[in-house]
Amino acid sequence: MVGLKPSDVPPPLGVKMMSAGAAACVADIVTFPLDTAKVRLQIQGEKKAVEGIRYRGVFGTISTMVRTEGPRSLYNGLVAGLQRQVCFASIRIGLYDNVKNFYTGGKDNPNVLIRILAGCTTGAMAVSFAQPTDVVKVRFQAQMNLSGVARRYNGTMQAYKQIFQNEGMRGLWKGATSVLNVITDHNPKMSLTHICLPGTLPNITRNALVNCTELVTYDLIKEAILRHRLLSDNLPCHFVSAFGAGFVTTVIASPVDVVKTRYMNSPPGQYRSALNCAWTMMTKEGPTAFYKGFVPSFLRLGSWNVVMFVSFEQIKRAMMVSRQRIEVVN
């Protein structure tokens, strides 16, 4: 068998959440340049090119960025990205099995609808909690490191502070649909409807789609491979399942991802809502705008899924082995 053997004892919730967060950070570090290239391609067309700079294809974008801004530009927003994964992946991936079991009452072999419901639930929980880190990550990836071009942010903590000061809590949760139960001193008559965070489901929709498609597809492909005994529960099985999940997820989630990226990166007032952002894209750039950056999206999601799920399965098993050895010693 390639890799560690699965544990006879189901891993507890803490092990799954820590394994998911750690695996997602590993995957982010490996694939972050592809994600940055995807963001640059997605926002191209939103504003005029700086000094004639145009991005053409994923590897052309990476080459242009390295040539004009230096190799460090490929990792703009990495700190916020890792912060996001620690908060986000540990919830959406780590809680998935437990939420799925909750909906089925502990029964085996849940149907597809139950899996989708579990994916939507953990995805919504995760994005509601980790949204500010996603906003900062996208804005760092979008900004150019060019001489003579003003930088919006110089550091992660400064970005959080500046967004809060200039745009308030609404800016940090831009693209989410959560409601903050806040009464401000400046306007004590403000109702909850006035402080609904802006956007009509851009990020929560995207993450619900990604989470459902990613986890459910991985779940189904892996189960089918094991049921038909094509592969055993090891690295090749995890690789094939993760690659398939990455492709299906990219096809379904790419249009929402483009809208989410543009809306979260936009300055206050550019778009009235996420729907307005989508309509502006359609009327000014046509339907193909919704699949801008598809190749880097697939390269990123495919490779991210492979690294994350393979790492997740191995880290989870390694933690269970260590846990069992500690119990034996004690």
Image (spheres, helix red, strand yellow):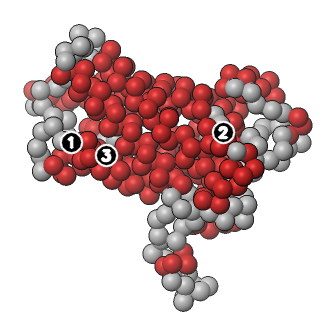
Residue 240 at x, y percent in the picture: 36, 19
| Residue at which label 3 appears | 116
- SS label for mark 3: helix
> Which quadrant of the figure contains the C terminus?
top left
- What is the C-alpha distance between the residues marked 3 and 2? 28 Å
Give the camera-side residue of 222 and 31. 222
Residue 141: percent from the left, percent from the top? Answer: 66, 40
Q: The residue tagged with tag 2: helix, strand or loop?
A: helix
Q: Nearer the viewer, residue 223 or 307?
A: 223
Q: Report x, y in % for residue 213.
A: 39, 39
Q: Position of residue 15 (x, y in %)?
A: 26, 38
Q: Is residue 223 left or right of residue 281?
A: left
Nearest to the eye among marks 3 and 2: give it: 2
Image quadrant for the N terminus?
top left
**Foreground residue among 280 and 130:** 280
Identify the residue under disc 1. 111
Q: Residues within 10 Å of mark 2 (few under 14, many from 20)?
A: few
Question: Label 3 crowding class (10 Å Cα cut-off): few <14, some 14-19, many 20+?
Answer: some
Residue ID for mark 2: 288
Q: Earlier in the sequence, mark 3 or mark 2?
A: 3
Res. 286 mark? none
